[in-house]
Image (spheres, rainbow, N blue to C red):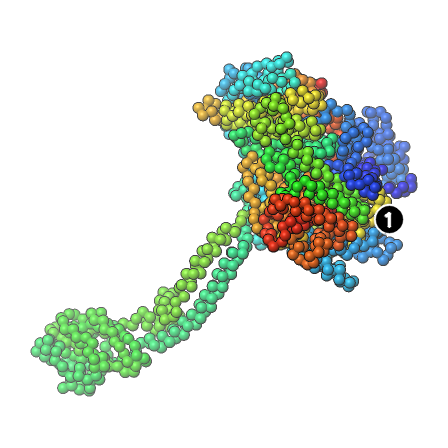
Amino acid sequence: MDPRLERQLMMTRRSLFGAAGVGLGSIALATMMAEDGLSSQANSGPSKPNVSGGLPDLPHFPARAKRVIWMLQSGAPSQVDLFDYKPGLAKMLGQELPASVQMGQRVTSMTAGQAKKQILPSIAEFKQRGKSGMWISDFLPYTAGIADELCLLKAMHTEAINHAPAVTHLMTGGQQPGRPSMGAWLSYGLGSANSDLPTFCVMTSRDREGTCGQLFFDYYWGSGFLPSSHQGVKFRGGGDPVLYLSNPDGVAAPVRRGQLDDLARLNSMRFDAVGDPEISTRIAQYEMAYRMQSSVPSLIDFSTEPEHILKMYGPDVHRRGSYASNCLLARRLAERDVRFIQLFHAGWDQHQNLPTQLINQCRDTDQASAALVMDLKQRGLLDDTLVIWGGEFGRTVFCQGNIGAADKKYGRDHHPRNFAIWMAGGGMKSGLTYGETDDFSYSGVKDKVHIHDLQATVLNQLGIDHKRLTFKFQGRHFRLTDVAGEVVKDVLA
Amino acid sequence: MVARAADAPIDFQREIRPILADTCYTCHGNDQAKRKSALRFDSRKGAFADLGGYQAIVPGHPEKSSLVERIISTDPDERMPPPDSGRQLTPKQIDLLRRWIAQGAHWQDHWAFIVPKRPQLPAVRMAEWPRNDIDRFILAKLEQEGLKPSPEASKETLLRRVTLDLTGLPPTIAELDAFLADKSPGAYEKVVDRLLASPRYGEQMAVDWLDAARYSDTNGYQLDGTRTMWPWRDWVVNALNHNMPFDQFTIEQLAGDMLPNPTESQRLATGFHRNHPLNGEGGRDPEESRVEYVVDRVDTTATVWLGLTAGCARCHDHKYDPIAQREFYQLYAFFNSIAETGKVDRGSNAFPMLAFTTPTPRLEKMQAEIACMEKTMQGKNAEQEAALARLEAEAIETEKLPTLGPWQSLGPFRAATDREAFETQFGPEKDSRPAEQYGDQRRTAQQYADGQTIKLALPDNSALYLARTITAARAMELNLSLGSDDGLQVWLNGQRLLAHNQTRPAAPDQEKVPLKLQRGENYLLLKIVNGLGPSGFYFAIKPTEIQQILAMPTVSRSAKHRDSLRRYLLTKLPDLAPLRAKIANMQKQEKELRAKSTYETMVMQERPTPRETYVLIRGQFDKKDLKHKLEPLVPACLPPLPAGAPHNRLGLARWLVDPANPLTARVTVNHYWQQFFGIGLVKTTEDFGSQGEPPSHPELLDWLATEFIARHWDVKAMHRLIVTSSTYRQSSRVSPDLLERDMYNRMLARGPRFRLSSFTIRDQALAVAGLLVDKVGGPPVKPYQPDGVWQDFSLGNIKYVQDHGEGLYRRSVYTFWRRSVAPTMLFDTSPRQVCTVKASRTNTPLHALTLLNDVTFVEAARALAQRVMLEGDPAPAARIDRAFRLATARHATPQEMEVLTAGLRRAESQFRNDPAAVKKLLAEGESPRDKKLDEVELAAYTAVMNVILNLDEVLTKE
């Protein structure tokens, strides 16, 4: 028998008996994420305690990580100025980038017409950090302080050259909108380990000056062709932290509780009359909504955090919706076993303001990013939490605009051929610098990692064979990594 | 789940092809690049090919078939499918393949590419159950499976079901009572016909089409600018309401612009394929965008009409279906010559565009007024013309020039000096009418030509009298032009008009003398006085311009003449100029207002010269395979374009709805089936290819498809057929046994029961609350949405400005759709990024939060509470029951009523102690509240209505 059907029937019977004998509470058992007709409080067997939903054959093998925190630095941080140390460039300021390096590759239409491709060496100083001697620029002092926790991938690459397609590529494995995002895949495949919160949570923030126009589209955390229950739930920086979380004005908790009790009674009467198990699921979802109403406000209430923890994340932590505040919230979600925590932070798109804005952008994010890693570590959570920091592509070594313009209105263009990200925890090697690039930080020359490889590696740490987590849509077995992707074994601890 | 006899014949289409497609096609399919040997399982020829002394499939002999050998091999190098492919065969599948070969390996071409034939109606035992032929097919299958159909749903349930299905709104109490009271045999069919004729029908049916068309009010991507495509949306609603046949619906949307002399409406229809997102991101190559748009059109067309996943062949040959990459680009060629730039051109729209004026009440009123005034003006004009004609006829008479009698001369009379000659009265001046003789001078007739200077040869110092009669038809004025050598005196009827003595040679116009003529004969007398030397005079009548014109025959009058005459005659009529000025002024205002209501909306239009089409290598926009230029063609697995058909969009559109096309009718009736029963006969609505699920009822699908064509693509007729079937009318109650047998209700031993779309849930809440504004069409509206949602996603750049008044209560289909962030009060919506033909239907706590807490639904609860408190019986149970009936169409059971009335009492006591909460709750929403009602009571009822509006039954089509 179809295992889903089996579960369904089991639940139906249980609901029937529950409604008759045990009372309402036991009806309300189904899961947060149930598809109509596929309602399931399934997989609550002994092999996976406290997990609801998900596919029966997952994980494919023991997982190294239980959850992921992805801090997406949207707009594309400059690897030239932050992680990819190229001392040779210092002497080459203003020289034309050799044609042999460019190889006629596509650039955006913003610099396609620019006659010169003049080399702009790093605007920041680099030093070796930690025991491993990882090169990190002075712009990121806090990140430099945790170098020994990091696994730095220096030869990342992608195909997309513009922001929206590149973020979509990174999050969904394809450049066009329409495919499920990574968090949705995990919700679909692994289900939820938390009964009071969504298993895929999203938070967005932006740089203080609002320098760039990058938008955060719903489909970055969409469910694509998977059931829409798997899409990320956005935690908002203002108003209700989750849309419609608060009771209507004037509806106090006892009133609401009474309403929900009545609703459950009436719905179970209807279930008795028509027999559709979907009704039981509905009752359960209303109860889950109620639990979210109490769990989310306490989740975002930082008043229980001791002062030294708040200090770690920096003063911005007190500003709800800031990057620092989202980082702390990410840790609190991780503690509650939320599976996939996605942060987006805008403001890294320095086409024309690199000398002035990059340092600010680093200041906004550096402390909190490092604090999150250390905070997880001191709680013993870093071992099974995979933390990822990085953008959707890199930036050109050559200058966009006039080098040495008095108003410093110049910067770097988009560069998909080479960029740097770091990961921490979740079964990654620490203190490792992986991948090498040419002398111009233009192309990877050794241990290149494509974004599909990165996706395959992340899934691998969660116990998933990326080739086997598929969904049949329009006749094709789609997967996150499209038709590519190899697990980067060298970086696994 | 019925056990199958081991030797039961195996159905290739249903049981074998899906295994081959799913497991083998990736390497042994249509994709030439991936195919490792001559062996391919997507064609009969390939599957049975001689592979060099052996065959994969030897009919009747599994033991000789290398397929069987390979799928059971334990050697990882031999085993098929290869372990690293991620694919595996189950023991059951292996057994099926083996038995199929043993049974003779009967092969059939893929069902969906064969033109449907009208199937015979199957025999059934429960002959009294079927109401129409649909039921025969459903029943036959149920009987084959040993199942029985469910009894008919209650009248209440049925009315609510069909009203929600056809209009997206619940029945009113009056409709409910009327239907319950109507015991006539055709009562239900009457309801169906009423619903099909309702303007709500088009709004309801449009939603799925908008999803398929990826309709949005914004462009998507980075700037997400607001476009103007809602005129197209209104076109769809209108076409559905008018039951436009589906073939015409297809042709106008895909190629309305290419029809002969296309109407504005036909051009507007082509907006269908301009609904894709537009990417105006900085740094983007417009050609890259344009290529994406063309690809999107191919994907969408293939999905919506053909149920094919053509997009798979963009980068390589399709792995599962017979569509080569080249064929993808041949389809692409049909859509590659739109006159578009790949940019966002003007007002967040992209060329080509159509200026489209939408009627607004103010504009319509103004236009009506202008029309009315112009009509008045026209009337006045007609009256005036008649009057003018009359006046002219009169004037011709009154202004007719008088008849001049011949000249008579008297004299000369001599004198000593010219002065004496001038002053001396020789006689004639004493008589008003000259006598025969004065002195020795007799009257002598003279022939002097008028209008010439006449020489007289008078003696020096003498006077000559000249007389003539002037006969006028009426009293009138006549101007004379006179000249004289030398002095001159003039009398008319004995009255001297002029006396002017001077020395001069005679010439025209020396004197201008107006004559006031009386009716009949008048007598004109001139006295010419000569000093010395030559003498003479000049005489001419000087008719006015008007007199001259009037005197001409009409045909000889020039335009200038006619104009002067008209102006002269108009002076004799009442003045119409102020009215004319008023009209002009209003026309100016109308023009300004019309400009404000004129929108540019995107449509399709071909370039003068088509673009050249090539395969794009790996689908990349800048990698054209220049070796092979492609023409527009349809894939070879489908019938070709008919001979003589144009190879353009119009030809393609007509080909799609040609009865020879095996897919369009099937795919379309399957959409309809999905709409009413929740799942299509083919579950994979978007994929009728080999990877799609075979139909649950293949004969019924073909019967419906052929019926659709036979009924000339009559959409409402098909909807009527479905909803009047016994199948549709069954109760949706399910027993655990039936659930076990058929969890997803594919056999249809019961009626459909599934959650309503979030569009319908909202519209239903507004309708039962009495808040719904049922205006059709127009620009999108912005109902309640929590603060900051748009700002959050747009980094503060885009702010949601909520409507007030009727914009809050329009049907959800008119809600402003921002592609980047869909309206938050709706859920499980199609993404509207790409074509979607199957909506998601999930059950999550976030939906519960929306329905319990969103002001839309709280306000609806408050308004519903107020409604039942104001209408009818004031007993609490009666009020609650009325609300319950509005929401579910049935009365509450006593047990339900007990819960609800207890809930009311509890809420009342809770609110009694919390007056501040009462104020807050009653302030939810902008619709007015009846201040006469007791506030605590209203709040308590609101809480109960909030429960009723969240009942599973209310959220569900039962």
Say which residue label 1 marks.
B147
Query: Would you say residue B605 is visible in this rendering?
Result: no
Image quadrant where residue A243 sits: top right
Question: Which type of secondary structure does the marked residue at label 1 adopt?
Answer: loop
Frontmost residue, B881 versus B826: B881
Frontmost residue, A380 versus B870: B870
Residue B385 to residue B147: above or below? below
In the rendered view, does B923 fall on the left or right side of B142? left
Say which residue appears at 75% left-offset and 39% top-offset.
A284
Residue A62 to residue B831: above or below? above
Residue B397 to residue A29: above or below? below
Label 1 environment density (alpha carbons within 10 Å; few <14, some 14–19, many ≥20): some
Across and down, in percent, residue A11 comes to 81, 39
Across and down, in percent, residue A337 comes to 71, 28
Image quadrant where residue A18 sits: top right
Frontmost residue, B258 versus A42: A42
Q: What residue occupies the far left of the structure in this picture?
A: B416
Query: Would you say residue A329 is visible in this rendering?
Result: yes
Say which residue appears at 61% left-offset and 44% top-offset.
B916
Across and down, in percent, residue B909 comes to 68, 46
In the rendered view, does A212 fall on the left or right side of B645? left
The mark tally for this picture is 1
The disc labelled 1 sits on which kind of residue? Leu
